Image (tube, rainbow, N blue to C red):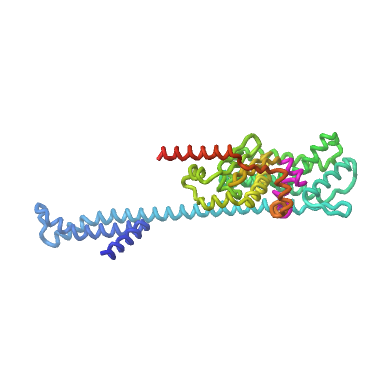
Amino acid sequence: MKGLKKLFSNLSIFFFGNTIIAIAVLIFLVGALIAFALPLFLTSISYLGMTSPNEIGDAFGGTTNPIIGLIGVGVTFLAFYIQYQAIEKQREDLQEQKRYNEYKYLQESIKDVKDDIKDLRYTKDQVTYTYSEAIWNFMMDNLQYGMGEQQILSPLYYQLEYILTLFEPIIAEVENSDLSKKEKFQMLMNIDGLFESSLAFILRVYDKSVVDGKEKMFRESVKYKIIIPAKKTKLELREILDRYKEPEKDIFHRVVMRTKGAAFVRHTRMIGKKGIVIFYKDYETYKLENPEGTVTEERFDAFLADRDNAEKIIINEPIRLLMKLDFLEKVSFQMHLIEVSLNIEVDRTEIQKFLDMDLAEFQLNKDRYRDEFVGKYIYDKRARERFLSTFVTVKAPSKKDKDRELREREREKEKELKED
């Protein structure tokens, strides 16, 4: 009996999972039932007067032929419908493949421009500068030479001009692609970050020259072939981004949720250009607000007890947020461990002065970020302590704070009991 039940269960699963086969079997069974039952049914009706086999055969044939014809029409329609679905599925697969290829192509195009910028070189007094230093020295030299100087321009001039010509077609390709709005936005944000983290150096030199009243000292060719196209590209990119742009607070929250320790974050919010991240204080609050949360109490307690890990997070993650999100000017983290609270409020200008490095360079060159920031301030004990003493406030909870937290927990438990 158990074997029959298992067989019936397996057959049910098979037919429910294969709709076309189930329909074909059903049509066959109904047809067979009609074929065998119709003669008996016809002979049972006395007023029809069908007694001989020929009469029954004629009646059976005359009745079943239209039925078989209708079934044939239905099966033919079903076959065409299945073929139509297969063609639609194939078309969707081709569209998806095309979209994927387009996405990969655009990603590769952006990577190529990024590599071109990272490879910039400028030699001066037998010293070869790279990336931002190359751009800065090149621009300052041209600022000093002035428009009337008949000196042959550095090869870097032609590299910058070439790179600028690459941005506009990539932006247009993203805008006209078949990507979703979210994918377009992410792609344009990558381009925007790349543009800002490279050619922004040129605009800073230009803005400095205007403040100092030296705008006329720029070479004519540098101004009209680098400065003006850079500003035009920046304006165009900003206008297109505005069509797809998410609210900054949503972008901030999304990026925070990808950082280390995101599972223990309670709140994220934006106040002006300042991003705030607050971590949970205890497991009870976490479970109350996240009843479906997957973090176990053991893992939560281990996180609260690991001060070394907390210090790495509070040093690294705020800097990464400032590096990735150019609209942020300040970032604040509030972490609560078992014995102490760690708080940081770091300003973009202050941290760049402390590091003697523009965060835009870290965004462009991940190797430099790994070597000059992570390797130094995360894993070098002395440098880490210097960073912590400069930016991080360590606070042990007072008796008043502990009592307040205890009362809050009791209130939350009472509320939970009432709801149950």
Horizontal side, residue 356 vs residue 322: left or right: right
Residue 144 is situated, as x and y percent measured from the top left of the image, at 88, 42
The part of the chain drawn in magenta is: 348-373
Query: Does the magenta portion include 315?
Result: no
Identify the residue at image location x=69%, y=48%.
Answer: 363
Of all residues shown, which one is farthest toward the front? Answer: 399
Residue 286 is situated, as x and y percent measured from the top left of the image, at 51, 44
Hey, which quadrant is residue 146 in on the image? top right
Identify the residue at image location x=25%, y=64%.
Answer: 1
Of all residues shown, which one is farthest toward the bottom? Answer: 3
Horizontal side, residue 295 vs residue 418: left or right: right
Residue 51's place in the image compared with 327, above or below, is below
Residue 309 is situated, as x and y percent measured from the top left of the image, at 63, 52
Residue 116 seen from this side:
no
Q: Main secondary structure of the magenta part?
A: helix
Query: Does the magenta portion include 370?
Result: yes
Closer to us: 239 or 210? 210
Horizontal side, residue 85 vs residue 398: left or right: left
Residue 8 seen from this side:
yes
Residue 254 is situated, as x and y percent measured from the top left of the image, at 58, 44
Closer to us: 26 or 39? 26
Residue 220's place in the image compared with 118, above or below, is above
Report the quarter where the C terminus lies: top left
Count of numbered tags: 0
